[in-house]
Structure formats: C-alpha cells, structure tokens
Amino acid sequence: MGVVADSAMKSGGEFTGHAVQHGQAVVGTRNVAEPLICDSMHERKAIMAEKADAFVALPGGLGTPEEIFEVWSWRQLGFHTKPVGLLDAESFWTPLIGALRGIADAGFLPTLTLDDLAVASELPSLLKELKDRLRSTSQREHGESLRQLGS
C-alpha cells in the first residue's frame, strides 16, 4: 500500500491512511501525512468499507486476501452492494483464482459468487468493470426505490 500512497501523492492525488494503534506503535502510516488512527483492525476495516465505493485487491501480502475475502463475503451476505475485484497484474492472483474455481467446482462456493468477483490483468480494464457494476447496481437500487415510492 505504501507504493500506492507514494504514487498517488507524487501525481497530485490524495491518499487517506487508516492505521492501527498497536501498543505504543502506530502500524501502517508510511508516507501518509495525516493517518486516521484506529483502535483495531475491525474498526479500520469498518471505516474503509463505509467510505469505499468499491474494493480492489492489488498484489500483496497476507492481509490483502484476508481483507478482500471479508468484503467479498459481506457482499455475498448482502451487507453491501459495492463491487469487489482483483487486479491480476502479471498473473499474481491466477493461482488463487484457480483455487476458487476448484472450491466452486466442489460445491462450496456458488458460481454466481465467483462470477461476481471482477478480475482483470490491467487497471484500466478493472476500473471499467467496477464502474459498470457500480452503474448497474445504482440503476437496480434506484429502480427499487422508485417501485417502493409507487407502492
């Protein structure tokens, strides 16, 4: 995430860091001018989930799949309708996607849930897919709201 923060800020963008207070140390504040300090990982993830329009996992370490699986599970359970995706740069997530297909083939993951995960090898393609899904969700939710008003 530090590379993403550095790149965003060097190009004039903004980056909000959500760090966790662990004992006396604050974890996860690399190159973030004003990190938002959280008491726990649960609080950190809840804040990020509230603020996010979509969720994307870039290639990363152990925390990356843990966090993306959690928000993907939340989506499957109906806690949110925000799209979830993997940036499969240089086929980084390909082994995981293969394992997920095996889990679906064994009947432990609905195919619709697997198909709901946006996957692309290049960022522009993934962002387009996520925007299309956001637009589709917004149209469905807007239509539902209009139906409810008409009742």
Image (tube, rainbow, N blue to C red):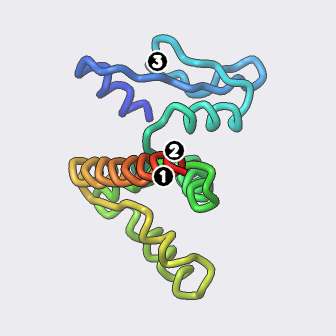
Q: Quadrant of residue 2?
A: top left
Say above or below: 29 vs 79.
above
Disc 1 and disc 2: Cα gap in Å?
Answer: 5 Å
Q: Looking at the image, can residue 81 be seen? A: no
- Horizontal side of 12 relative to 144 (left or right) equals left
Kindly indicate whether the residue at mark 2 contacts the one at mark 1 (C-beta within 8 angstroms): yes
User: Secondary structure under badge 1?
Assistant: helix
* Residue at the right extreme of this rendering: 23
The tag earlier along the polypeptide, 3 or 2, is 3
Disc 3 and disc 1: Cα gap in Å?
Answer: 44 Å
Residue of label 3 = 32
Residue of label 1 = 147
Image quadrant where one finds the N terminus: top left
Residue at 66% of width from left, 27% of height from top?
20
Q: Label 2 amino acid?
A: Leu
Residue of label 2 = 149
The tag earlier along the polypeptide, 3 or 1, is 3
> Disc 3 or disc 1, which is closer to the eye?
1
> Disc 3 or disc 2, which is closer to the eye?
2
User: Secondary structure under badge 2?
Assistant: helix
Instruction: Point out residue 85 in the picture as x, y percentages from the top left corner.
Output: 41, 55
Residue at 31% of width from left, 26% of height from top?
8
Q: Label 1 amino acid?
A: Arg
